[in-house]
Image (cartoon, rainbow, N blue to C red):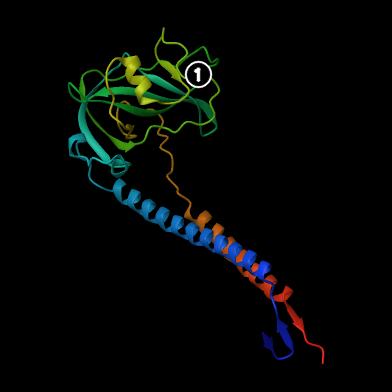
Amino acid sequence: MRIASYHFNPGAFSTFVTIALLYIMMSLAFWQMDRADFKDTLQQNIIERKKLSPVGIEELPAPIESRRYLPVNFMGEFDAQHSFLLDNITFEGSVGYHVFTPVKIDGSKTILVNRGFVSQGKTRDQLPEIDAPDGKITISGLLDFSPSRTLLLAENVQETSRWPVVLQYVDLNEISQLLGYELYDMVLWLDPDETASFEYDLPVFNLNAAKNNGYAFQWFAMSLALSIIYIVVNTKRTIK
């Protein structure tokens, strides 16, 4: 192909490699854009869910994804004899635990409730004393998935001879077996104004779609750079 005094004559192999690379990079760019749109939509849905009026557990939708961060309100009774301390938690510069206590909603349904943060004692052997209100009380909070596992420093349940039991991660099936009764498939973040709550430590749910948009821009920029290199390398000026 001739354009004025320039001759564009790419080789078959370089053309094939360039097209293949452009296809991959452009696909990745559009995939990152789709991820950013998905996160933006999900973030907005969660913000809207938190503003909804609380409902009872029995009124919730069936899919677990549709229940995340929905506010609920119900009558329940704490299993005050059995609390769990999720280890390796930091909050406002302090090291400590998240306190989880089961709440019995009715004869067949029990939910594990995250009551917030408590500081660690002077030594790891000195566990904080955890109590809970007696009798049936009104409980309000936000539903969430059980905490994801991070770096594990030890086995999960090492000692059950004393309560509260220290956990390295929250596994609802393991805890159900330890308690001897079934748990609801999500946990509840107790509202900060509830009588049984400790320091409120609900994580900010930030899906960070900006990062995906940044990756998409990088892939588009690399595609443009590759196209320019392909054209420049394969274009020669004709000498008259």
Against 57, residue 96 (above or below) is: above
Q: Amino acid at mark 1?
A: Glu
Location of residue 39 in the rendering, given as x and y in whole percent from the top left corner: 42, 53
Determine whether the residue tagged by mark 1 lies in a helix, strand or loop.
loop
Q: Which residue is mark 1?
A: 155
Tell me: 54 left or right of 221: left
Residue occupying the point 73% across, 73% down: 233
Q: Is residue 149 or residue 70 the one in the foreground?
A: 149
Q: Is residue 170 above or below residue 8?
A: above
Q: Between residues 224 and 108, which one lies in front from this camera angle? A: 224
Q: Quadrant of residue 139?
A: top left
Identify which residue, 181 or 4, lies in the foreground.
4
121 is higher (above) or lower (below) than 188: above
Q: Residue 159 at x, y = what percent?
A: 45, 11
Identify the residue at the far front of this view: 12
Identify the residue at image location x=38%, y=32%: 146
Q: Position of residue 16 (x, y in %)?
A: 62, 66
How many dots with numbers?
A: 1
Residue drawn at x 36%, y 29% is 114
**Whole-percent x and y of residue 8?**
69, 81
